[in-house]
Amino acid sequence: MSQEESCIIRHFSHYCVLTDEEKKLLSSLERSPTKCKAGQTLWEEGDEANEFCTLRSGWAYSYRHLENGNRQILEVYLPGDIIGLREFAFSKRMDNVKMIEDGVVCHFPHQHMLDLFRDSLKLTSVMFAISSRQQALLTERLVTLARRSARQKLAHFLHETFLRLRQTNADDTSEFRLPLSQEQLADILGLSPVHISRTFTSLGEDNLIHRERHQIVIPDLDALACEGEFSDCYLTDSMRPLFSPYNQDVAICED
Amino acid sequence: MSQEESCIIRHFSHYCVLTDEEKKLLSSLERSPTKCKAGQTLWEEGDEANEFCTLRSGWAYSYRHLENGNRQILEVYLPGDIIGLREFAFSKRMDNVKMIEDGVVCHFPHQHMLDLFRDSLKLTSVMFAISSRQQALLTERLVTLARRSARQKLAHFLHETFLRLRQTNADDTSEFRLPLSQEQLADILGLSPVHISRTFTSLGEDNLIHRERHQIVIPDLDALACEGEFSDCYLTDSMRPLFSPYNQDVAICED
DNA sequence: CGGCCACTTGAGCTATTTCAATGATCGTGG
DNA sequence: CCACGATCATTGAAATAGCTCAAGTGGCCG
């Protein structure tokens, strides 16, 4: 399997330099790629939880239904992400996962994770790091949901998504495609769809973002960061060598 | 070290039966207990992150400052909890942690976690499970913050806290001490302090909770669950054996 | 006893929601 | 290629949950 093809290896490479051995271990997580259609459900609340998915292409999201008919989107998954990490410790799925657009996912059973734990201290740590990072994303959004205005929420989310995309895609434009409907954005940010619309025009009037269908242009990234009180430390800045000198054999590069 | 004394062992025992060997490994995480005063800061945003803490007694919380002067509390830690798991993968602290009341914490360096990974597949998995559970708590609160009314937020939080306390304390009353000011509750639930007050009286009028200073009585747990749309699956229900048959040597009991 | 702090209560204000109607865009099938 | 229906986005007007400000109450500690 070429490195080009494997999102998961690219994802892990963000955290450390991988040996061929490790790449081989990892690529076993990406067997059996499956095509998924937009809107397709990967699993639902209450389903048996016994595997993870890696998202090779397309976007996906996890969400929860509330009794009043509302819906809350918990996480937006981009290519390279691992889906279902949260439920490693649980027997049942705690939320629903759906594809946003057509894409490809690879399933791997929880058992493989244990093999990983057994076979590679380094990959164990990276897995833990990835889980931590997902948690950091959640935490950041929690703060946003609790305490920020609609403008800030939207600005923050767009900024974050832009950076996440750039981290794996490495193209250097200020433009990206956002395949989310305003209803979906509303369900991410805890707002009503109509208010998303109003907020978009409001941000547009202040030249903070431009939007043409699902194409987003960010004229001034810093200005947007300021509006959304965005600080990227939870995305970038912060990864670090997990191993002390006496563990050189498994040292993680800093790059 | 007697088992009575070690919150962390009691905490881990929730997930599996531990051998003496494992208990010994774990108790190395609880060396050097330190007394902390109410209001004391354990660490601040930006500090070097190179250790975890286990909370042996007292409550603590992590929080974030916003630019507008607001504050958002992210997690409330109860005795037995591990503090700082999120930053395992990061070099800097991403939030502040403070004691709510007098208590005792034990520090252990990140390096010890790696030792744990190396020495025990079982404890590695349990650690992962604990991290997952913390994430589940965050997720649940995220939903609550995004989509529920003030009454639901408060009802949900009280219910959750009650259950968490009962899980480690195992006393079977419907009463508990809540050492949080209304300002702190406001910062947890993304509300204003005055509205916390109003919401308390509102819930009281409907006989959903009674409150005398910091003492909370829940007359009807089911009614409260209903009000807060609370489902305990993310707290209890759901832990499960992590290991397949061919890993019997490290099998986790179901109990 | 006095002062301080946390809580309560009231009144007006604001951001966001809801409801409803209109307009744009997309995919589909003729 | 066009017409149609369906979905998605916009706009306006009225309703509301929760906020802010401000004043009052009560308990607790020195």
Image: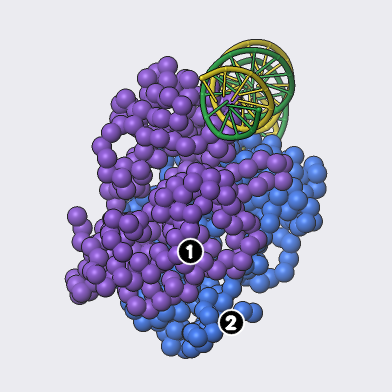
Chain colours: A purple, B blue, C green, D yellow
- Whole-percent x and y of residue B181? 58, 46
Chain letter for mark 1? A
Residue B78 lies, with reference to residue B148, above or below; the image says below
Q: Which mark is residue B15?
A: none
The residue shown at (46%, 49%) is: A103
- Whole-percent x and y of residue A37? 53, 48
At mark 1, the secondary structure is strand
- Whole-percent x and y of residue B80? 51, 68
CB within 8 Å, label 1 to label 2: no
The residue shown at (25%, 61%) is: A16
- Residue A115 shown left or right of residue B81 in the figure: left
Task: Decide: few, some or many residues near mark 2? Use Cα within 10 Å; few <14, some 14-19, many ≥20.
Answer: some
At mark 2, the secondary structure is loop
For badge 1, the amino acid type reads His
For badge 2, the amino acid type reads Cys
Q: Nearer the viewer, mark 1 or mark 2?
A: 1
Q: Do dots 1 and 2 share one subunit?
A: no
Residue C15 lies, with reference to residue A252, above or below; the image says above
Quadrant for the N terminus of chain A in the image: bottom left
Task: Decide: few, some or many residues near mark 1? Use Cα within 10 Å; few <14, some 14-19, many ≥20.
Answer: some
- Residue B224 shown left or right of residue A238 in the figure: right
Chain letter for mark 2? B
Distance, label 1 to label 2, CA atoms, is: 27 Å
Q: Which residue is mark 2?
A: B253
As rendered, which of B103 and A217 lies closer to the eye?
A: A217
Residue A206 lies, with reference to residue B175, above or below; the image says above
